[in-house]
Image: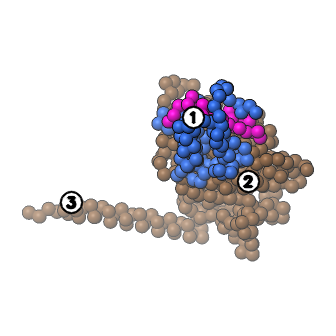
Chain colours: A brown, B blue
Amino acid sequence: MASVFPPESNKITHIHRKFLRLAKQQKLSLERKKNSKTNWKKITFPPRVKLIEEPNETLAYFNQAYNYYKKGHNVDFDLSNIVQFSPESIAVLAASIASFQFTNRMGSRGNMPKNYILRKVFQDSGFFEHVNVLDKNFRAISKTSAHLLHKVTNDKVVTGVAKDTCSYMLPKINAQYIDDLEPLYVILIEAMQNTNNHASGKTEIEYDWWLYRYLDKNKGIIHFTFLDIGVGVFKSLPVMNFIRKLSNTANITSNLDLVDELLSGKIKSRTKRKDRGKGIPQIYDQSKDNMFKEFYILSNDILIDTKKDTKIKLNEEFYGTLYYWTMEIKKQ
Amino acid sequence: MDYGNKKTVKMEIKDTIVIAKDFTDDPGAREEKDGLNSGEIFYKELLLPKYLKAVEENYRILIDLDGVFGYPSSFVSGSFGALSIKYGSEQVLKHLRFKSDRRPIRKDKIIFEINNPERKDK
């Protein structure tokens, strides 16, 4: 008697087809949501947005956007009323909107600040090279003159970017030799290597990072922001393995308890890439150099001021790792 | 001139490596697959052949560290650390001398790595 079930080979083909059909349906549903005129949620930023100064308040807006994306909504960023948007916040906004991990592949759009000065800051940064803007008359500046840089490289450290940044800073801090820029150079290389966009620990590593340089001419200060959007240090494989290996985890009540171990280099990579666990301790050591006026590390729910050696636990989470520092321009 | 080395064993310096001129002024990461100017490339193409010759003919190499943007830890580990793992710190320090007038701390960093090389399989 013939079986009512299809033969084994047909069964596999049948399941495969079913999966393909489901994937297609999901893709279509996503496209429909993305193209829908009604599926938009608005995020209206307050007049002042300062991530490092007011981390909880600022991250709450980003996390609100993240939650909208996660639920399958498109997000409309209203920047019109902003009068102050700190440089590190601009970098985070651009990186977040450009990251599929953050946006869940949903749509984003936004308007521009009414404030002329801030509008120019956004324009000069190259922000709109990375983010769509509703104003059709707006002309974005060319990528070559933008100071907001996004790099995605497969397993490659781009020494040229570190070199160019140091060369730019050389006359600004009255340095005599390129050797004098070593702390800055090492921080950039280590930060590039330390980008950790996934916790899987797979050997094929994608370096996906952002670097933003902003010159505040009035105050004579250059602001640098280096960041990646991903799992963040405290959810990365080396830290998770470190916690797993501890015989007594009772003392670890929050990520705050891991900061000293992280900065002293006690948390090492358990992957094949030994250099991966060394990045943050190296960055921390170099950040002590006098060439840096301020230096902060923000990852997950931890904000570290490396100059003052203080650390705080935040109520809001940052999905990634961010280094923010300032350097003073020295008068000739 | 004191090159910051502990022992004064009489051995002539017969060769030099000026990293900025002979290799690059922007050293990169550890391995070749990490990108340009890696420690591995420096080790394979410059450091190792010169070191082997110095051992064979019993002389020292002076390594000039100046004129470079910086030495990332992974570069140092992939070059001087790798040499130390293969030939031992004592032997390596016997044949290498370091010079950095502009940033003397570099010598300490490299000598520390030679004395405490980070093994990849550790």
Local crowd at mark 1 within 10 Å, few (<14), some, or many (≥20)? some
Q: Main secondary structure of the magenta part?
A: helix
Q: Which residues are magenta?
A: B86-112
Q: CA distance from mark 2 to mark 3?
A: 61 Å
Q: Residue at x 74, y 31 (%)?
A: B2
Q: Viewer-nearest of labels 2 and 3?
A: 2
Residue labelled with disc 3 = A8
What numbered label is drawn on residue B58? 1
Local crowd at mark 2 within 10 Å, few (<14), some, or many (≥20)? some
What numbered label is drawn on residue A165? 2
Name which residue type carries label 3: Glu
Q: Is residue A242 above or below residue A197?
A: above
Badge 2 and badge 3 both on one subunit: yes
Nearest the eye: A47 or A127: A127
Q: Viewer-nearest of labels 3 and 1?
A: 1
> Circle 3 — which element?
helix
Q: Residue at x 65, y 58 (%)?
A: A150
Nearest the eye: A13 or A6: A13
Q: Quadrant of residue A265?
A: top right
Tell whether position A172 is magenta: no
Local crowd at mark 3 within 10 Å, few (<14), some, or many (≥20)? few
> Circle 2 — which element?
helix
Q: Residue at x 53, y 40 (%)?
A: B52
